[in-house]
Amino acid sequence: MIGVFATAVLLLGLAFAAYRWWRRRVHRELEIGAASTYQRYLSSEPDFLSGITEARFADIYCHALEPRLPGYILAITVLFVLGSPLVLGTLAGLAALAAATGMVPQPGDVAMDLHLNAQGASLVRRFSPDTLAYIVQGWSGFYYFFGLLAYWIALSALLMRRYHRRSSGSLRAAVRRARTAPPVDATPE
């Protein structure tokens, strides 16, 4: 199991390296586009760029137009792979704690009272306790499945909420915000 996990971590490391290489390449291309767009705006709408230097415009341009989704997908994948064993370990610990404190009946106890057939389940014992113990033990898979599913859904929801909250919007909106925002190095009085 450790070998599988180590392989997954190695593959994620390679994916991260490929992502960084791709992001640097895209950023260089965006800087070229920023220079030509700045010149176009400067000649057609000089008032739109009032107070914005070419370097500041390049930063705004790259931030507004750089694809962010691949980074978030990589982050979700890394957190899935690294967090899932921790979640499963936590769920196993909680199950052991619940069984030790008597919060969860033992499969043998439940099997003595439960009858399963094609019509449904009843509390009259008709099968051997061994057979029913295996059936009841199989139900614990639902606990792990839905626990892991809840982790994945919560993680996806949190990261996608962050993705949409941190969206810069259109280039024009980002330039307008930069014009009205105080300079970063300004100190409040």
Image: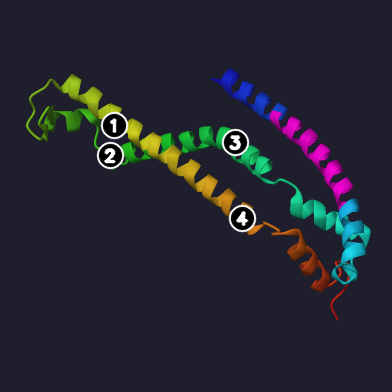
Judging by the rendered image, the residue that carries numbered circle 4 is: 164
Q: Earlier in the sequence, mark 3 or mark 4?
A: 3
User: Which amino acid type is shown beneath numbered disc 1?
Assistant: Trp
Q: Earlier in the sequence, mark 1 or mark 3?
A: 3
Give left or right: position of 92 versus 63. left
Q: Measured from the top left, where is residue 72 in percent x and y?
A: 64, 43
At horizontal 86% and vertical 42% (from top left) the residue drawn is 28
Label 1 to label 3: alpha-carbon separation: 28 Å
Q: Which residues are magenta?
A: 15-34
Which mark lies nearer to you, 3 or 4? 4
Q: Measured from the top left, where is residue 122 in percent x and y?
A: 10, 35
Which mark lies nearer to you, 2 or 4? 4
Judging by the rendered image, the residue that carries numbered circle 2 is: 104
Whether label 2 touches label 4, CB < 8 Å: no
Name the image quarter holding residue 74: top right
| Above or below, comparing residue 124 to residue 152 in the picture | above
The quarter of the rendered structure image containing the N terminus is top right
Judging by the rendered image, the residue that carries numbered circle 3 is: 77
Q: Earlier in the sequence, mark 2 or mark 4?
A: 2
User: Which amino acid type is shown beneath numbered disc 4?
Assistant: His
Name the image quarter holding residue 164: bottom right
Q: Circle 2 sits in a helix, a strand or a loop, which is it?
A: loop
Label 2 crowd (10 A; few <14 / some 14-19 / many >=20): few
User: Which amino acid type is shown beneath numbered disc 2?
Assistant: Val
Q: Earlier in the sequence, mark 2 or mark 3?
A: 3
Label 2 to label 3: alpha-carbon separation: 33 Å
